[in-house]
Amino acid sequence: MSQPSILIITNRVPFPLNDGGNLATYSMVKGYHEAGWRVYLFSMNTTRHFITKETLPSLFHEIDFESFEINTDIKAVGVLINFFLSKKPNHAERFFSKQFENRLTEIIQEFQPVVVQLESIFLSTYINSIRNITTCSIAIRLHNIEHQIWESLAHEMKAGLKKIYLQNLAHRIKKFELEAWQIADVLIPITQKDADCVKDNIHLVNQIVVPYGICVKERPIQNDNEAWHGYHLGAMDWVPNAEAITWFLNEVWPTLHEELPEFQFFFAGRNMPYSFHKYHGNGVHCVGEVLDAASFIADKKMLIVPLHTGGGIRVKVLEAMAMGKLIIATSISMQGIDEAKSGIHFLQANTASEFRNQIVLALKDKTQATIIAENGKKLVQEKYNEGSIMKSLDEFMRIQINISKTQL
C-alpha cells in the first residue's frame, strides 16, 4: 500500500500552537502527512476554542481538513443532570453530538480510511458508530491517563461537596477509560509510564509509545540576550495549570521576591481567569493569552513548571529544553521525559523552599545553570527527534493495516 489513508478526529482544532495539546496533535498530523499518508483531519470547532479557517497555517490546506462547529461549554444544569442521571463522565457527554456523528459517518464512507485515530479518549463514544460502517483499524492517542489527573485533584481537595464530586468523576472516568482501551485496536500512549498503566489494567493490549517529537531544525535560534527571568506558559483553563500557578504565587513568590527583588516572573496562557490579574505587580507579570508563544518566551531564560497533578508528557517542557531554556520543575512536570536527570538536564523542585533554593542557586551560578540548560537541549535533540519517532509510528501503523487485512 503506497499511500495509506488516515482519518484523525480531534475535539478541537489543533491551532494556535500555544499549548501542549495543540502542539502534540499538530505534530502528529504533520508527521503522518510527511510520511506519505493521505490525511483527513476532522475537528470539533468549539465555542471555547473557536478558530477561523483564515488563521490556519499551510498544513491545513495541504491535507483534507474540515471543522464542525459545536458548543461543548460546561453548564451547571448539564453537570447536575449528568451526575444524577448518567453513568458516563460529563466530559464524554459534552463531546457527543448526533450531528457530529452523522457527519463523521459520511466522511468515513467518502474518504474510506484504513485507520481512524481519535486524539482524545472522550471521543471513543463514536467508536460503535465507526464500527458499524467500516472494518478499518481504530487507534486512540493517549495524551495522558485522564483518571489519574482527576484522582489527584480529588485527593488534594478538602472535604466537602466538591471533593465528593471529583471522587465520583474520577471513578467514572476510570471506568470509561478502561472500557475504551479494550475496544480500540491500537493505543498510542505518549509515555512509557502511561503504557505501563494500561498494561497493569488491560493485559492483552496492542500499543506503541509515541512521545512528542521535536523538529530541531525548526527551533528558533537561541537568543543570546535572554534575561534571567522566569516564565510559565500553558492553557489556564486546564485545572492542573491553574492550581500550579496559584500555588507558586501564594507559596513561593512572596519570600522569593523579598530575597530576589530584581527577579521577574511572567505567566501567560489561553483563557486566563480574571482572578489571576490580582497577582500582577511586585515582579509578577500576568500577561494573559499571547498570539505568538515563541516571541513571548524568546527573551526569558527560565521555565518554571510547578505542576503537582497531571499526566502524559509536558510538551512545553520539551519545547523549552530544545530552545536551551533552564527548566525548574516538579517531578510530575518532568514525567515522561525519563532520561532527564535533576542537576544534569534540569533542576527539580517539589516544595516551596526547593523552588526558592533552585532559583537562587541558578542566579548565583549562571555558568553552571547554562551548562544544565545546554545538557537538556542536547538530550531533546538526541532522544526526542521528530523524524525518528514518526518513522517508528509509520512502520508500526502500516503493519497494523496489513494485519487487519489478513483478518478480514
Image: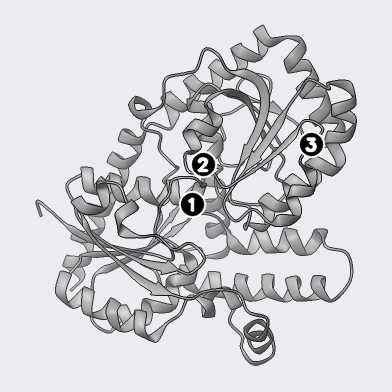
Q: Locate residue 172: give its quadrant.
A: bottom right
Q: Is residue 158 above or below residue 161?
A: above
Q: Quadrant of the N terminus?
A: bottom left
Element at badge 2?
A: helix
Q: Can residue 81 be seen in the rendering of this structure?
A: yes
- Marks counted in the figure total 3
Tell me the crowding category of disc 2: few under 14, some 14 to 19, or many 20 or more residues within 10 angstroms, Cα based: many
Q: Earlier in the sequence, mark 3 or mark 1?
A: 1
Kindly identify which residue carries mark 1. Answer: 21
Instruction: Indicate the amino acid at tag 1.
Output: Gly
Of residues 49 and 285, the one drawn nearer to the viewer in this rendering: 285
Q: Earlier in the sequence, mark 1 or mark 2?
A: 1
Q: Which residue occupies the extreme bottom position in the image?
A: 85
Q: Are marks 3 and 1 in contact (CB under 8 Å)?
A: no
- Distance from the alpha carbon under mark 1 to that under mark 2: 8 Å
Instruction: Indicate the amino acid at tag 2.
Output: Val
Instruction: Indicate the amino acid at tag 3.
Output: Gly
Q: Which labelled disc corresponds to residue 315?
A: 2
Q: Position of residue 181 (x, y in %)?
A: 47, 67
Q: Which labelled disc corresponds to residue 231?
A: none
Q: Position of residue 8 (x, y in %)?
A: 31, 62
- Distance from the alpha carbon under mark 3 to that under mark 2: 28 Å
In percent of the image, x 80 and y 19: which residue is there?
360
Q: Quadrant of the C terminus?
A: bottom left
- Given this view, does label 3 or label 2 mark the residue nearer the observer? 3
Q: Are marks 1 and 2 in contact (CB under 8 Å)?
A: yes
Of residues 175 and 236, the one drawn nearer to the viewer in this rendering: 236
Q: Position of residue 250 (x, y in %)?
A: 85, 43
Kindly identify which residue carries mark 3. Answer: 281
Of residues 179 and 267, the one drawn nearer to the viewer in this rendering: 267
- Distance from the alpha carbon under mark 3 to that under mark 1: 30 Å
Q: Is residue 114 above or below residue 392?
A: below
